[in-house]
Amino acid sequence: MSDPTITVPVDLTNPGQFFACCGLLELASRIDEHALGWFDGSKYCLSTFAEGFLDKFFSCTVDVDTSYQSAGTDDDEEERKSQAMSTIPIEGASFQ
């Protein structure tokens, strides 16, 4: 097996973390059809050959539907958008 591009610590007894790893592989395979994902002990490994995979991955924008929230000022809307686009670090993850 090739060296992983990304490793993420994972608790395989947690279904949410398992399915999150499946989602990472799904996203990687949309950029690189040869992407591989596997579990190695308590970590999830992802290997991709796509040039700039992480740049493409982290440059994606996400639209958040806030229509269910109560009406607020334009300043409140900008604050919510800013918070939605914040980067959340993955503790213990390594990127090569």
Image (tube, rainbow, N blue to C red):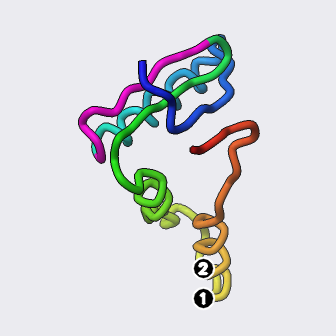
Determine the residue positioned at 65% across, 17% down. Answer: 14
Identify the image quadrant of residue 56.
bottom left
* Image: magenta residue range: 31-40
In the rendered image, residue 35 lying in the magenta stretch gets the answer yes
> Which residue is outermost to the front?
2
Number of disc labels: 2
Q: Does the image show residue 63?
A: no
Assess whether residue 37 is covered by the magenta stretch: yes
Residue 38 badge: none
* Residue at left offset 66%, top offset 87%: 75
Where does the N terminus fall, quadrant-wise? Answer: top left
- The correct choice, above or below, for 32 with respect to 15 in the image is below
> Dot 2 surroundings within 10 Å: few (below 14), some, or many (20 or more)?
few
Q: Name which residue lies at 62% across and 14% down.
A: 12
Q: Amino acid at mark 2?
A: Glu
Q: Marks 2 and 1: in contact by CB < 8 Å? A: yes
Packing grade of label 1 (10 A; few <14, some 14-19, many >=20) is: few
Q: Determine the CA span between mark 1 and mark 2.
A: 5 Å
Query: Residue 87 at x, y = what percent?
Result: 65, 60
Q: Residue furthest left?
A: 33
Residue on which the image places disc 2: 77
Q: Which mark is residue 74?
A: 1
Which sits in the foreground, 37 or 79?
Answer: 37
Residue 62 in the image, given as x and y percentages of width and height: 45, 62
> Tag 1: residue type?
Asp
Residue 43: image quadrant is: top right
Q: Is residue 83 visible?
A: yes
Residue 19's spot in the image, x, y percent?
Answer: 50, 25
- Mark 1 residue element: helix
